[in-house]
């Protein structure tokens, strides 16, 4: 019953959005897919994957496909603050654009410094015009930390010398939904690492509006596009964790779904890069993997068109989707328990990660020995005394 109600609610919302005029009259998502050689079947398979990723029933797949086809109904303003543009690059740098990348190209980007042709006064005009024209209707995506020291004097642009802080606050004030894309925008990132000379902060620290954090350095393209689709489907914020991250993407630890988890449980660890354990794909915890402390879906969604991710490639997770990871997770190639200083998590997690595998291995050995002994007794020939 609840599922039926939700289906009808989403159908109704998409029906309302469909009444809006598309902002790109000369292009449709169906035409775009056809031009790029992506079949309808591939598109529906992608929609089914996105539906599962958002923890929706498989029967909602047609709604997901419809939502993707309506992505040009909502204008998007994308701001760059103190960052490296890596989050945008995760969507753009691909030799064979996936559906996620194509949808990002297709949505109505009213302002994006990396992509737009406009520059100088024209770019400033485009931004102020988009904020005014689509007030209360546009999606705001912010990439990069917000410098706040010295009255936020940093990132000044244009003849009016608007600061990055004032631009972010103004854009956030009129947005229908706000997404902090990447760890810099979510939590400050490397700019906020000690001693944080510019006073860089996450977007949520400089606005009173609700902000959905999509951390990662960078986050996967699927996590970025998935949040846009979630908003189109529901028109509301997704279920969030304590750090305002969507639970559908950040509800599990890297450790929970890691393909090396079996080696961890068996007490099989890489002791140093290049050793026999590394060649056999053993657990990377002892060479610094922060998977036990990091919440993200990298191990499931991966990067580079889903081909790989850092742990699969042989390097441990560095915890980049966690707050203050640059300070809290380093050194990146040593376990947190080896640090000279007090860690954010204390020693409990390290004791668990360092000892549970060995303990389980010992318990397994005892169990195997006991099983063998019982089997030997049951299978022994009877003696005359018996």
Image (spheres, grey):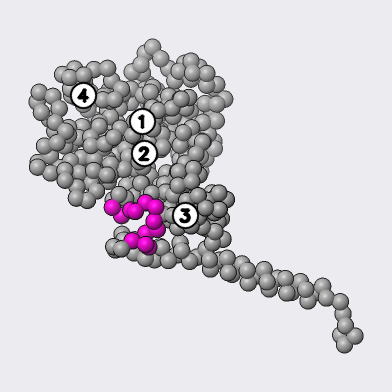
At which x and y percent is residue 233? 41, 33
Which quadrant does the C terminus fall into? bottom right
Determine whether the residue tagged by mark 3 lies in a helix, strand or loop. loop
Measuring from the top left, give residue 262's x and y in whole percent: 56, 55
Q: Residue furthest right?
A: 384
Q: Which residue is mark 1?
A: 89
The disc, 2 or 3, on the residue closer to the chain's N-terminal end is: 2
Nearest to viewer (mark 1 / mark 4): 1
Mark 3 and mark 4 lie on one chain; the one further toward the N terminus is: 4
What residue is at 20 percent from the left and 44 percent from the top? 200
Task: Please name the residue shown 72% across and 71% down the image.
Answer: 372
Magenta residues span 327-339
Q: Which mark is residue 176?
A: none
- Identify the residue under disc 2: 218
Magenta region, main secondary structure: loop
Query: Which numbered circle lies on residue 127?
Result: 4
In the foreground, 39 or 334: 334
Q: Which residue is mark 3?
A: 272
Which of the marked residues, 1 or 3, is nearer the chain's N terminus? 1
The count of marks equals 4
Which mark lies nearer to you, 1 or 3? 3
CA gap between label 2 and label 3 equals 26 Å
Q: In this rendering, does residue 17 appear at all?
A: yes
In this picture, residue 140 sits left or right of residue 97: left
Left or right relative to 40: residue 224? left
């Amino acid at each position: 019953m609840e599922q039926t109600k939700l289906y009808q609610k989403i159908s109704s919302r998409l029906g309302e959005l469909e009444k809006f005029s598309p902002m790109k009259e000369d292009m449709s998502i169906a035409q775009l897919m056809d031009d790029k050689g992506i079949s309808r079947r591939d598109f529906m398979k992608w929609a089914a994957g996105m539906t599962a990723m958002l923890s929706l029933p498989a029967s909602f797949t047609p709604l997901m496909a419809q939502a993707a086809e309506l992505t040009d109904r909502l204008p998007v303003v994308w701001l760059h603050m103190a960052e490296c543009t890596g989050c945008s690059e995760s969507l753009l740098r691909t030799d064979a654009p996936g559906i996620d990348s194509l949808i990002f190209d297709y949505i109505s980007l009213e302002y994006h410094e990396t992509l737009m042709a406009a520059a100088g006064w024209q770019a400033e005009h485009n931004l102020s015009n988009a904020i005014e024209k689509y007030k209360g209707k546009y999606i705001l995506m912010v990439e990069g930390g917000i410098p706040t020291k010295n009255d936020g004097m940093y990132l000044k642009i244009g003849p009016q010398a608007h600061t990055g802080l004032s631009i972010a606050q103004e854009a956030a004030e009129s947005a229908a939904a706000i997404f902090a894309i990447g760890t810099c925008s979510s939590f400050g990132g490397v700019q906020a690492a000690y001693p944080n000379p510019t006073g860089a902060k996450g977007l949520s620290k400089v606005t009173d509006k609700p902000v959905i954090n999509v951390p990662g350095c960078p986050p996967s393209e699927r996590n970025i596009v998935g949040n846009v689709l979630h908003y189109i489907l529901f028109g509301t914020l997704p279920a969030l964790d304590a750090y305002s991250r969507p639970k559908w993407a950040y509800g599990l630890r890297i450790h929970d779904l890691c393909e090396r988890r079996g080696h961890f449980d068996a007490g099989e660890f890489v002791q140093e890069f290049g050793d026999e354990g590394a060649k056999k794909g053993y657990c990377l915890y002892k060479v610094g993997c922060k998977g036990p402390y990091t919440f993200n879906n990298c191990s499931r969604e991966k990067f580079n068109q889903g081909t790989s991710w850092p742990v699969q490639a042989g390097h441990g997770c560095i915890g980049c989707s966690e707050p203050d990871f640059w300070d809290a997770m380093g050194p990146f190639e040593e376990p947190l328990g080896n640090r000279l200083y007090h860690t954010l998590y204390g020693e409990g997690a390290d004791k668990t990660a360092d000892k549970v595998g060995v303990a389980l291995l010992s318990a397994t050995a005892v169990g195997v020995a006991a099983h063998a002994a019982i089997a030997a007794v049951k299978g022994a020939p009877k003696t005359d005394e018996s």
